[in-house]
Image (spheres, grey):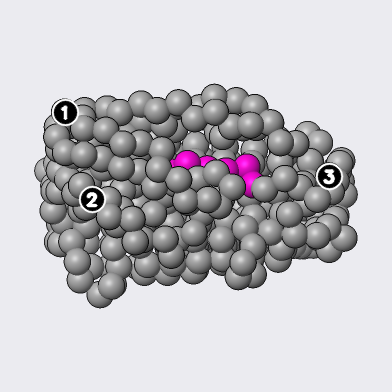
Amino acid sequence: MRTCSLLPLLLPLALPAQTTWNVAPPANLDAVFAAAAPGDLVLLAWGTYRPFTLTKGLVVIGPATIQGATGPVGPWDTDITIPAGQHAALIGLDFQPTQQPGAPVPLSGNQVTVTGSASFEDCSFGTGVPHSLVVTSGEVVLQHCTVRGGPGLGGGFRQAGGYCSMSGSTVEGLDAGSFGGPFTILAQPGATIDGGTFTASHTTFRGGNASRDNGISRAPAPALAGSGATTRVFLADSTATGGTGIAGGANLPGAPAVTSSTGQPVLHARTNLAGGTGTVPGPASVGNVAADPQIVGLAIDHGLWFGSTSTATAIAGSAALLAVLATLDHAVTAHPAVVEPLFGLQAQAVTVVVAVPAAGGAVPVAIVVPNTL
């Protein structure tokens, strides 16, 4: 059985909740979360809620919009800090920016900052300042999510440390521009990885586009930028497109798809790296970037809802015995076929795939989730 790097994910809803809280807007979510206990289920009725601080392993389910109130009164940003031994799951939340009166772009929030163990499903982020979504440490999983950069001052996604995995998601950078006075907007990457380990499977990245006004040209940005001596980045079955240099009146070279000054190369498999259009097309990559066809990608067709059947599909790097370990525990790495962990059901380590696919072949596996609510 060979060793392979796996790009997750299987996203759990969580262990059965102790108490269910039914909440309607404009409830103060900080107060609701303060009353709830770890493991509780918070159901948000459709509507708009203020940004919140979450410090417990709760399951929070929308659909709902999280947005600061217009005007000088906050909070405008969302902070998620989960203690060790707990896990938070957030599903169906749209983190929207706050539009200040008379301002052409958001001047504050809603930046979502995550520390600890948390998973997001069918969520959207942006725009935040300076980024829409920031992972500082811990273990963070995103499935079927969108991270937007702009219009505004904020970039897209940033990881400073920890472990983060994306699957079936879209990440957009910030387009360059200006909005009068001394304020100028420089294009930002869709994803900036300057610490920790980042994996993405079946995900689309786009860099910010160029602009020109008042005689000033602003260059486009790459789709993904990596830096840091110990940073690790793995991409499988994804697309990364650099920002275009011909946009907003600008007539410049296109940006690379990926730039990297990491100590270890950004590795990619079956991933389309496309430089942005421009007077000179951008290159596919610049710096420490390399192809590794042995990386295994994994996607799931939809969430692991209780009582449903989901299909996980692994894309194999070669014709060799393939095993996929499903676990919520990032420390479980002793399985002989796993380098990077997978996130799965009920925090239990279980093998969900054992097969010998053709090189580059797909291995679909049905997963039945019992209705335990």
Classify the position of the C terminus by image quarter: top right
> Residue 128 location, x and y as percent?
56, 56
Q: Nearer the viewer, residue 95 or 282?
A: 95
Structural crowding at the residue carrying mark 2, measured as other residues with C-alpha within 10 Å and reported as few (<14), some (14–19) or many (≥20): some
- Tell me the magenta residue range: 8-14
Structural crowding at the residue carrying mark 3, measured as other residues with C-alpha within 10 Å and reported as few (<14), some (14–19) or many (≥20): few
Which one is earlier in the sequence, the residue at label 1 or at label 3? 3
Which amino acid lies under the numbered mark 2 shown in the image of this protein?
Answer: Cys
Residues tagged 2 and 1 counted as in contact (Cβ below 8 A) = no
Residues tagged 1 and 3 counted as in contact (Cβ below 8 A) = no
Give the side of residue 184 with respect to residue 89, left or right.
left
For the residues labelled 1 and 3, the Cα–Cα distance comes to: 46 Å
Let me know if residue 203 appears in the view: no
Q: Which image quarter: residue 51?
A: bottom right
Q: Decide whether residue 296 is among the magenta residues.
A: no
For the residues labelled 3 and 2, the Cα–Cα distance comes to: 40 Å
Q: Is residue 330 above or below residue 322?
A: below
Which one is earlier in the sequence, the residue at label 3 or at label 2? 2
> Residue 151 location, x and y as percent?
51, 46
For the residues labelled 2 and 1, the Cα–Cα distance comes to: 15 Å
Residue under numbered circle 1: 358
Residue under numbered circle 3: 20
Query: Predominant secondary structure in magenta?
Result: loop
Nearer mark to the viewer, of 1 and 3: 1
User: At numbered mark 1, what does the secondary structure look like: helix, strand or loop?
Assistant: loop
> Residue 98 location, x and y as percent?
68, 51
Residue under numbered circle 2: 4
At a point 23% along the width and 50% down the height, the residue shown is: 4
Q: Nearer the viewer, residue 14 or 75?
A: 14
Which amino acid lies under the numbered mark 1 shown in the image of this protein?
Answer: Ala
> Residue 39 location, x and y as percent?
73, 54
